[in-house]
Amino acid sequence: MKVYHGSYVEIVKVELAKCLPQRDFGQGFYVTKFKHHAETWAKIIGRKHQTQGVVTEFDYTESPFARHICKIKRFDAYDGEWLDFVVENRRNKKEQAVHDYDIVEGPVADDKVQFRIKDYLKGKVSKQQFLEELRYHEETHQICFCTKVSLQLLENTKELVSEFAHINEPVIEKLLLDSGMDDKTAAEIFFSSATFAQLADASTGLHLKPWQEIFELLKTELKSKEN
């Protein structure tokens, strides 16, 4: 599906280290399926940075491969579990995340909701009252990509990612079969490698090579790191 990110600049490369902590679902890169919501946020953050604001469009497909390598959490509505999760993330002042999900999807705690969350935490409103109010709240949506592995499933529609995405799966499968490591570790090693960085650079032409050749490059890189 098409998803959107509103910012004061166009997003060419996502850097998780630059993403703000203490957000609804923790530190990560946030997108929404509602383009008008991203446009609204782009205008707000654009004014703050004295720009017009930009909405960057991405493609995201939750394929069987995605579910295989990523731990995904989805909240289908504003409910008690969602509230507890958001409160825990927004209260977290540690560098370490409070959860181990790669991707989290669910409703947004916008300004109005955040204000009521503060009332809830102060005991001014009960959880039941708070959730009852949210039954009439406008539908919202966000997806948080929390890890480097998850970001590989998010394709910038202006990039060449879709042309080499088919290479990722066989390379990762071969790596875990040869090494005995688990799926997520294999994916993290591949996506953090210099081989993948070269693959993602269209100018190298590596994406035109068969995946077996790319895997051999990865093996050579990993072996050199061991020595």
Image (cartoon, rainbow, N blue to C red):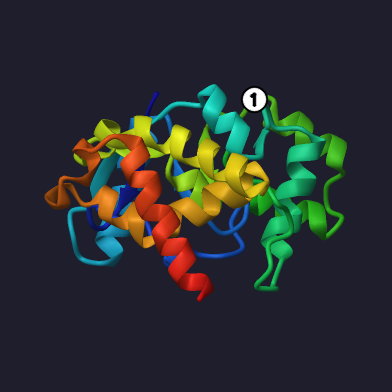
Q: Residue furthest left?
A: 203
Q: Quadrant of residue 27?
A: bottom right
Relative placement, left or right, of 14 versus 49 is: right
Residue 166 image offset from top left, x and y in percent: 36, 29
Relative placement, left or right, of 107 versus 191 is: right
- Total residue callouts: 1
Q: Nearer the viewer, residue 72 or 22?
A: 72
| Residue at image mark 1 | 136
Identify residue type, mark 1. Answer: Tyr
Determine crowd level at label 1: few under 14, some 14-19, many 20+ residues with C-alpha closer than 10 A: few
Q: Quadrant of residue 50?
A: bottom left
Q: Residue at x 23, y 38 (%)?
A: 209
Q: Nearer the viewer, residue 75 or 187?
A: 187
Q: Residue at x 24, y 35 (%)?
A: 157
One can see residue 59 in this view: no
Asked if 28 appears above or below 75 in the picture, the reply is below
Q: Residue at x 23, y 40 (%)?
A: 207
One can see residue 164 in this view: yes
Residue 215 image offset from top left, x and y in percent: 40, 45
Residue 1 image offset from top left, x and y in percent: 40, 23
Q: Residue at x 62, y 46 (%)?
A: 184
Residue 155 image offset from top left, x and y in percent: 33, 38
Q: Nearer the viewer, residue 141 or 44?
A: 141
Q: Residue furthest bottom?
A: 227
Element type where label 1 sits in the image: loop
Asked if 43 appears above or below 39 in the picture, the reply is below
Q: Nearer the viewer, residue 69 or 60?
A: 69
